[in-house]
Amino acid sequence: MIADAQASAASPGGPRPPDGPGWVVPGLLVATGVMLVVALAAGRYQIGLDELAALLWRGLTAPHSLPHTADATVLFRVRLPRVCAALMVGTALSASGACYQATFRNPMVDPSLLGVSAGAALGAAAGILLSLGVVGIQLLAFGAGLAAVLVTILLSSLVSKQGEGTLTLVLCGIVTGTLCTALLSLLKYVADPYSKLPAITYWLMGSLASANLLDAGLAALFTVAGTIPLILLRWRINVLSFGDEEATAMGVNTRAVRAVVIAASTLLTASAVAISGMIGWVGLVVPHLARMLVGPSFAVLLPTSLLLGALFLLTVDTVSRVVFAVEIPLGILTAIIGAPFFIYLLVRGRRGWA
């Protein structure tokens, strides 16, 4: 029976295993759409639903004739870029977390495993210390995140032994992340305590308050580029979760699949961190919640994680700017929500993640 299930999962053209309740993905689409409307309308400056619909329609059909009103300015220059960035960042972090957990067969894995988050944080801190602009800081964070993963892979290739590649890669990722964190602490120590240090500290808390159309466009570009390979390989990733020996016996090139997954997940995580700063727990908790809804089959777990991550971060971002008198950084809110939920998962001891 196990062999039949594995064979079904390995063959995209053959029968597929049950993919969880059929209402989950449509339900998440509807919930995300509703939350999208709420996020665009709600805030310190309220926009009526009729006016919101009229402005969005005019923006789609005649963008050059938009009125110069307060509603249009708030919607198109502030809220729409921020909402789009929240959707893309939530999608990227949750997708990379789900892929890492399936690939490394460990439910405790999150997108920061190979040092990409720590590397991006180091790059952003260096950009702030050098007084670069917003775009320069984001580019430096993105490049440093990718460089950290490349260092991890290089170290792993130098010290790994036969049959220990995955374990060595994880350990080298921990070392790289620790080193980047130490260098980040050094930059914070030498930073100007009246200007640079507060800026670095605030960036590390995670926020979308300064997101603009360029940020949203770049986030969308990198999210699509990183997600497409994962969607195309979702059945092979499903088989990879059975273990390398079983996956190889079923005809899956484990090294190639793992390399593509790591590259795509790194691209997703680096782009998200470069735009939003350090927002933790999304890539760890959301895949677990998606698994509770649809089960461990990666073919449906991946789209569920994508939608759930987008909905989760959009909701948290809306709450952060609507509910509180002072906007709370997203990293703080995701930790407040994610930590108790993860404790609940540990206490419950839910199985079946892989």
Image: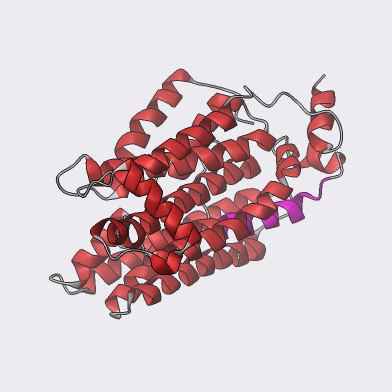
* Drawn side of residue 287 relative to residue 78, left or right: right
Does the magenta stretch mainly form a helix, a strand or a loop?
helix
**Vertical relation: 264 (above or below) 129:** above
Q: Which quadrant of the view contains residue 351?
A: top right
| 15 is within the stretch colored magenta | no
Q: Quadrant of the C terminus?
A: top right
Q: Which quadrant of the view contains residue 225?
A: bottom right
Q: Residue 343, percent across and down?
A: 38, 27
Point out the stretch of residues depicted in magenta: 252-267
Q: Residue 183, percent across and down?
A: 35, 68
Q: Please tell me which residue is depicted at 64% across the width and 24% down the height of the picture.
A: 22
Q: Quadrant of the N terminus?
A: top right
* Drawn side of residue 127 relative to residue 171, left or right: left
Seen from the viewer's position, the closer of residues 354 and 151 is 354
**Vertical relation: 281 (above or below) 345:** below
**Vertical relation: 154 (above or below) 111:** below
Q: Please tell me which residue is depicted at 53% across the width and 29% down the height of the picture.
A: 27
Q: Please tell me which residue is depicted at 31% across the width and 45% down the height of the picture.
A: 41
Seen from the viewer's position, the closer of residues 291 and 155 is 291
Seen from the viewer's position, the closer of residues 169 and 4 is 4
